[in-house]
Image: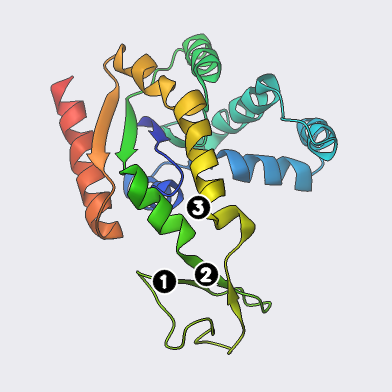
Amino acid sequence: MRIVLVGPPGAGKGTQAAFLAKNLSIPHISTGDLFRANISKQTELGKLAKSYMDAGNLVPDEVTIAMAKDRMEQPDAENGFLLDGFPRNVSQAEALDELLETESMQLDAVLDLEVPEDEVVKRIAGRRVCRNESAHVFHVTYKPPAKEGVCDVCGGELYQRDDDSEETVRKRLEVYHTQTEPIIDYYKAQGLVVTISALGKVEDVTTRAMEALKRGEDDK
């Protein structure tokens, strides 16, 4: 299967992508991993991406698309893949369609993880991280430490990262609604979108996703 995974920040895309890829025996292709791998290996694309990042600029779509193309052409992706973090906007979605058409391939589904906005804010803004090197993660609601502000594992101070503040989370959600959410309508027009609730236990969401993907395949 060839799947695109979408959803707002805090929807648990990375976690679900790993489980789904394993269950479906296809590679999980994450944009973040692609950037890190290309930069670490100092590929031409990695050097190009780093030059934009070092200058404080966004990496152009064509560089991201080229990295994704290179990864999708690897032998382990021959029977399918799960894209996480790409495409991020409609122009990238259009470019992906063109790329797949060139390779005589097509997407099987776009899995939309649905989470209410208030829950997204609660999930991310409630995270607390240990200042020590271990960087253990807790949550004020879902995984509170035994003693407030103190790491259960090493006794280090727990703090809220700047990226996890409510103000920053709401800004990230605005970017998602403006740039990424429109691809859902783009793919709905192609009959590819499968929407599930991403609330509840991780394993329950995975089961829900697998069942929805199977129904989608059976309906074709």
Disc 3 vs disc 2: which is toward the camera? 3
Mark 1 element type:
loop
| Residue that label 2 marks | 128
| Residue that label 1 marks | 140
In front: 121, or 27?
121
Q: Which mark is residue 166?
A: 3
Left or right of 40, for residue 82: left
Residue shown at the point (35%, 18%) measured from the top left: 185
Mark 2 element type:
strand
Left or right of 1, for residue 97: right
Residue shown at the point (39%, 49%) measured from the top left: 120
The quadrant of the picture occupied by the N terminus is top left
Q: CA distance from mark 1 to mark 2?
A: 7 Å
N-term mark: 1 or 2: 2
Residue 159 place in picture, x, y as percent: 59, 72
Q: CA distance from mark 3 to mark 2?
A: 13 Å
Residue 107 place in picture, x, y as percent: 38, 22
Say which amino acid is labelled 3: Glu
N-term mark: 3 or 2: 2
Q: CA distance from mark 1 to mark 3?
A: 14 Å
Can residue 22 be seen? Answer: no
| Furthest residue in direction front, as rendered | 167
Residue shown at the point (49%, 33%) measured from the top left: 174
Residue 57 place in picture, x, y as percent: 77, 31
The quadrant of the picture occupied by the C terminus is top left
Say which amino acid is labelled 1: Val
